[in-house]
Image (cartoon, helix red, strand yellow):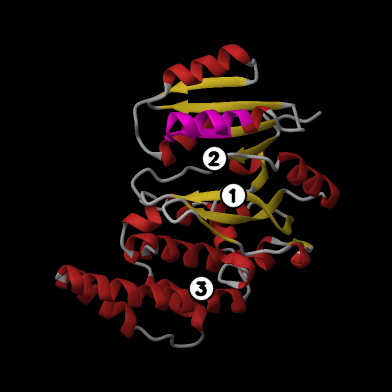
């Protein structure tokens, strides 16, 4: 049986951590290594390590989720990788999908639980189920697909099972507030086949302290990440239709940053954004990419 490495950055409360670890260890798929990157809950981590040989604990100073993931990726010995933030109950279904389709990545949808409201955001119903296999470029077309919340599924690292080899050259940036926006798409580009099931297999708890609820939109949608993405896609020969979608998304982000720079009174940033907005392609939209990225 192939081994699956479950990566858990330990930054949650002790009660949530216990629920998370219990859910992982009770999975029907049992050949796991559970990698805990601890920066503050040493006693609980050690207790679970003593109770179950599959649990491995690595200690590090608090450096954020990105640095914890990077440390965990160094420790992975499994054939596949799953990232977990809270309770988990979907390893078997993702593994079955991946093996059935001979894919490199298996992806599921999720339901959001808004903790301070005690309410659920349900994006997918039982009647909406389907499975589909995509090439990496085909999957990119869903990056801005609001139907069934697929656009969020695209960016987040969880509710996915990845072949471990895809992360050989992947590093999460430790100096950014939204590290996933810089990283997840790069993993997709390493894959030949991506399998998606339109089923909510994970409940994501959205707290009042979540990054997307505590920073402004300019931080949630940085320019640097999409400029980098545009450059990479252009260099590897992505289809023109895909590039055009990215450019439209880039224009939308520019408008957000324009507004935020005015609110801050940052005229230098505002002027830089205006210059980028004034640039025009001379031939096709994709020719514009090199002129947008400094």
Side of 142 where 282 appears, left or right? left
| Residue 42 against residue 128 in the figure, above or below | above
Q: Quadrant of residue 73?
A: top right
Q: Is residue 15 magenta?
A: yes
How far is mark 1 from mark 2, CA to CA? 8 Å
Q: Earlier in the sequence, mark 3 or mark 2?
A: 2
**Mark 1: secondary structure:** strand
Which of the two discs, 3 and 1, sits closer to the camera? Answer: 1
- On the image, the x and y values in percent for residue 250 come to 43, 73
Which residue is more in the foreground, 291 or 42?
A: 42
The tag on residue 245 is none
- On the image, the x and y values in percent for residue 276 come to 32, 77
Look at 60% across and 56% down and name the residue there: 111
Q: Earlier in the sequence, mark 3 or mark 1?
A: 1
**Mark 3: secondary structure:** helix
Q: Which residue is mark 2?
A: 86
How far is mark 3 from mark 1, CA to CA? 29 Å
Look at 34% across and 78% down and name the residue there: 255
> Is residue 53 something that shows in the picture?
yes
User: How would you rate the neighbour count of disc 3 (Cα within 10 Å): few for under 14, some for 14-19, many for 20 or more?
Assistant: many
Side of 173 where 45 appears, left or right? right
Cβ–Cβ under 8 Å for marks 3 and 2:
no
Magenta residue span: 7-22
The tag on residue 246 is 3
Q: Quadrant of residue 277?
A: bottom left
Q: Is residue 226 magenta?
A: no
Q: Earlier in the sequence, mark 1 or mark 2?
A: 2
Side of 218 where 240 appears, left or right? right
């Amino acid at each position: 049986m192939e081994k699956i490495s479950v990566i858990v950055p330990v930054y949650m409360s002790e009660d949530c951590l216990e629920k998370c670890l219990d859910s992982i260890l009770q999975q029907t798929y049992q050949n796991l290594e559970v990698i805990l990157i601890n920066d503050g809950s040493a006693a609980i981590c050690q207790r679970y390590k003593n109770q179950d040989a599959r649990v491995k604990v690595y200690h590090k100073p608090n450096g954020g989720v990105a640095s914890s993931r990077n440390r965990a990726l160094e420790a992975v010995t499994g054939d596949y990788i799953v990232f977990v933030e809270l309770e988990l109950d979907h390893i078997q279904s993702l593994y079955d999908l991946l093996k059935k389709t001979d894919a490199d990545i298996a992806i599921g949808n999720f339901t959001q639980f808004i903790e301070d409201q005690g309410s659920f955001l349900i994006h997918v119903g039982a009647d909406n189920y389907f499975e589909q296999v995509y090439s990496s470029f085909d999957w990119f077309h869903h990056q801005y697909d609001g139907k069934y919340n697929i656009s969020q599924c695209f960016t987040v690292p969880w509710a996915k099972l990845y072949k471990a080899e895809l992360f050989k050259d992947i590093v999460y940036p430790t100096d950014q507030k939204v590290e996933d926006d810089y990283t997840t798409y790069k993993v997709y580009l390493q894959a030949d086949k991506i399998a998606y099931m339109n089923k909510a297999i994970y409940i994501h708890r959205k707290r009042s302290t979540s990054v997307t609820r505590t920073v402004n939109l300019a931080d949630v949608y940085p320019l640097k990440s999409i400029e980098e993405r545009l450059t990479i896609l252009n260099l590897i020969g992505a289809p023109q239709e895909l590039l055009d979608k990215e450019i439209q998304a880039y224009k939308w982000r520019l408008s957000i940053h324009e507004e935020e720079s005015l609110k801050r009174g940052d005229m230098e940033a505002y002027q830089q954004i205006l210059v980028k907005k004034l640039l025009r392609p001379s031939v096709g939209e994709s020719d514009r990419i090199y002129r947008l990225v400094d």
